[in-house]
Amino acid sequence: MKLNRRYAKCNCIKEIKALNTAQGYKFFSPDTLQFFDSVIEDDVFGGCVFVTSEQNGYGNPRLYTVRTIQANGRIETLSDFQGIETLNQALAKARTIASELLQG
């Protein structure tokens, strides 16, 4: 099955970062990542789905978000922001979403 043309097809997180930056977006800029205390996981599912985690202040838990990159380089949030409690849950959700996107 083909991936919906709305989404980019990237082989790794490095390509996702490069596309986002090339299109003038700042999602992966050091300032943005620092502001949200973001960590970007290395796994990419279906060529466009990936997981981030953010920690909302010292002492609060690190929570996870599933995201995708659109063909225009924009990052779209596919789960509730910080709505997933564990990395394993987030990765499983990312795999499921990627599979659904690939099926159209």
Image (cartoon, rainbow, N blue to C red):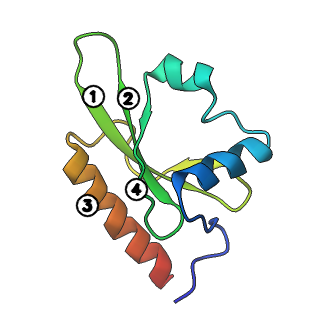
Is the residue marked by circle 1 packed among few (<14), some (14-19), or many (20+) residues within 10 Å? Answer: many
Label 3 is placed on what type of residue? Ala
Cα distance between the residues tagged 1 and 4? 18 Å
Label 2 is placed on what type of residue? Glu
Q: Position of residue 61 (x, y in %)?
A: 22, 24
- Residue at image position (43%, 22%) is 37
Secondary structure at numbered mark 3 = helix
Cα distance between the residues tagged 1 and 3? 17 Å
Cα distance between the residues tagged 4 and 2? 16 Å
- Residue at image position (28%, 33%) is 63
Q: Give the residue pinned by disc 3.
A: 92
Q: Are marks 1 and 4 in contact (CB under 8 Å)?
A: no
Tell whether 11 sits left or right of 70: left
Q: Where is residue 97 in the image (x, y as percent from the top left)?
A: 39, 66
- Choose the circle earlier in sequence order: 4 or 3: 4
Secondary structure at numbered mark 4 = loop
The residue lying toward the viewer, choosing from 12 and 63, is 12
Which labelled disc corresponds to residue 62? 1
Q: Are marks 4 and 3 in contact (CB under 8 Å)?
A: no
- Choose the circle earlier in sequence order: 2 or 1: 2
- Residue at image position (47%, 22%) is 36
Q: Where is residue 40 in the image (x, y as percent from the top left)?
A: 44, 40
Q: Give the residue pinned by disc 4.
A: 43
Q: Do the residues labelled 2 and 1 touch (CB within 8 Å)?
A: yes
Q: Do the residues labelled 4 and 2 touch (CB within 8 Å)?
A: no
Label 1 is placed on what type of residue? Arg
